[in-house]
Image (tube, rainbow, N blue to C red):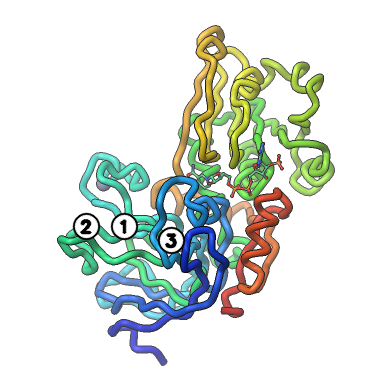
């Protein structure tokens, strides 16, 4: 039995260098302090953001890197001041493990927009004085969920409803909240014609939430490979092949709201053309190169182009509770840790239905 009041070693998988292969090694987790929850990680989703960070698409990474911010598991230890969790609870951790807790965003429960920056679950450094890992020279690096355990302050731990399967629930912690939050903030309505661009991990969750909110949902995907599954399994109302120029022209001006989850460079103007007067295109996908925009494509019909980043802790809990009530889970392919490299390649090729999830018992 591990004594979590002292620093503990933890088996994990991660990359020693940028673009490196995913290999097993050990890290040291901090001693659990009074507000900490120790979670035995059961499943960790593979988000395309993991790939972007390992490949340094968004800038230099911190290596060795243990990716993973879609974490589900069971509480195995709680610090003396923990009130929100008990041993045995199903718990989750998403993209953040801390924030300043003081600024206007944090005060509103939107820690993802922390004015001085939230601390990411991995590829980040602890940087706030309320955290025991803070040092004036810069705190210690964070390590994510491709690991056996994770130790997180209770304020950044989520409750996973007990009726939800832990494998299917893990990606809710990023893919789920990232698609749920903009639908709430930008006001998706049941009478809206809503479209999801890109049918991957985020995209398939956007379809589920769009249906859950009562909208008419169209999937926009390249080719027709995903058409049948989108319409039958995901129960989308319609399908639009983004590579079919005639179909794209016919669909011009027909949507109220598009959520763009595309992970790579694409012609955003084509998607702006698909929305009506006053329509919205909200970007959540994070291509590593700028997307040129024609101003006239926006102002002629007063369209809105916006972006959204994950969601705050309270909203993430709301989303998990919504999923619990409606039995919404991610469609996952569960893999052993030895298949992470292969899963990265398949994710880059958009060949996953719709999220790889690592079974951490194989670590
Ligand atoms: P994913 O599972 O790989 O899905 C991305 C989808 O984008 C693919 O399934 C594919 O859809 C489409 N796509 C890929 N390359 C394309 C190209 N060259 N042209 C057009 N479409 C292309 O990725 P994910 O995990 O859902 O993440 C999607 C993006 O969101 C990533 O960039 C990720 O970093 C970002 N992200 C952002 C946030 C946030 O808070 N804003 C949070 C999480 C992730 P089809 O095969 O259907 O065409
Ligand atoms: Zn993610
Ligand atoms: Zn803040």
Q: Position of residue 38 (x, y in %)?
A: 39, 75
Q: Which of disc 2 and disc 3 is earlier in sequence? A: 2
Query: What whole-number distance in Å separates the C-alpha atoms at marks 3 and 2?
Result: 21 Å
Front position in the image: 64 or 98: 64
Tell me: is circle 1 under 8 Å from ligand 3: no
* Circle nearer the viewer, 3 or 2: 2
Left or right relative to 325: residue 231:
right
Q: Which residue is mark 3?
A: 158
| Residue 128 marker | 2
The relative height of residue 205 versus residue 278 in the rendered view (above or below) is below
Mark 2 closeness class: few <14, some 14–19, many ≥20 residues within 10 Å: many
Q: Which residue is mark 1?
A: 98
Query: What whole-number distance in Å separates the C-alpha atoms at marks 1 and 3?
Result: 13 Å
Find numbered disc 2 in the image and state the secondary structure of the residue it sits on: loop
Q: Position of residue 230 (x, y in %)?
A: 77, 43
Callout 2 touching callout 1 (CB < 8 Å): yes
Find numbered disc 3 in the image and state the secondary structure of the residue it sits on: strand
């Amino acid at each position: 039995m591990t004594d979590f009041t002292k620093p503990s070693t933890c088996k994990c998988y991660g990359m020693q260098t940028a673009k490196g292969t995913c290999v097993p090694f050990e890290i040291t987790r901090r001693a659990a302090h009074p507000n900490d929850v120790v979670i035995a990680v059961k499943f960790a989703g593979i988000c395309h953001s993991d790939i972007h960070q390992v490949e340094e698409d968004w800038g230099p990474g911190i290596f060795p890197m243990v990716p993973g911010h879609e974490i589900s598991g069971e509480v195995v230890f709680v610090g003396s001041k923990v009130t929100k969790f008990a041993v045995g609870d199903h718990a989750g951790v998403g993209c953040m493990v801390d924030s300043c807790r003081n600024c206007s965003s944090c005060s509103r429960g939107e820690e993802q927009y922390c004015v001085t920056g939230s601390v990411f679950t991995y590829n980040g450094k602890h940087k706030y004085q309320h955290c025991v890992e803070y040092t004036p020279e810069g705190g210690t690096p964070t390590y994510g969920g491709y690991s056996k355990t994770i130790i997180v302050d209770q304020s950044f731990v989520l409750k996973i409803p007990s009726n939800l399967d832990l494998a299917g629930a893990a990606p809710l912690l990023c893919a789920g909240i990232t698609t749920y939050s903009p639908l709430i903030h930008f006001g998706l309505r049941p009478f809206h014609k809503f479209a999801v661009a890109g049918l991957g991990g985020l995209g398939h969750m956007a379809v589920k939430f769009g249906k859950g909110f009562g909208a008419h949902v169209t999937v926009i995907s390249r080719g027709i490979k995903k058409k049948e599954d989108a319409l039958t399994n995901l129960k989308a109302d319609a399908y639009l092949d983004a590579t079919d120029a005639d179909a794209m022209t016919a669909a011009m001006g027909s949507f109220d709201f598009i959520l763009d989850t595309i992970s790579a460079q694409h012609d955003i103007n084509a998607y702006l053309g698909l929305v009506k007067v006053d329509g919205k295109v909200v970007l959540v996908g994070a291509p590593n190169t700028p997307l040129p925009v024609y101003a006239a494509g926006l102002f002629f019909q007063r369209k809105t182009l916006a972006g959204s980043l994950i969601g705050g802790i309270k909203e993430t809990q709301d989303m998990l509770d919504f999923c619990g009530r409606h039995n919404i889970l991610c469609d996952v392919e569960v893999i052993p840790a030895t298949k992470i490299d292969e899963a990265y390649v398949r994710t880059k090729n958009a060949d996953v239905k719709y999220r790889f999830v690592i079974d951490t018992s194989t670590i």
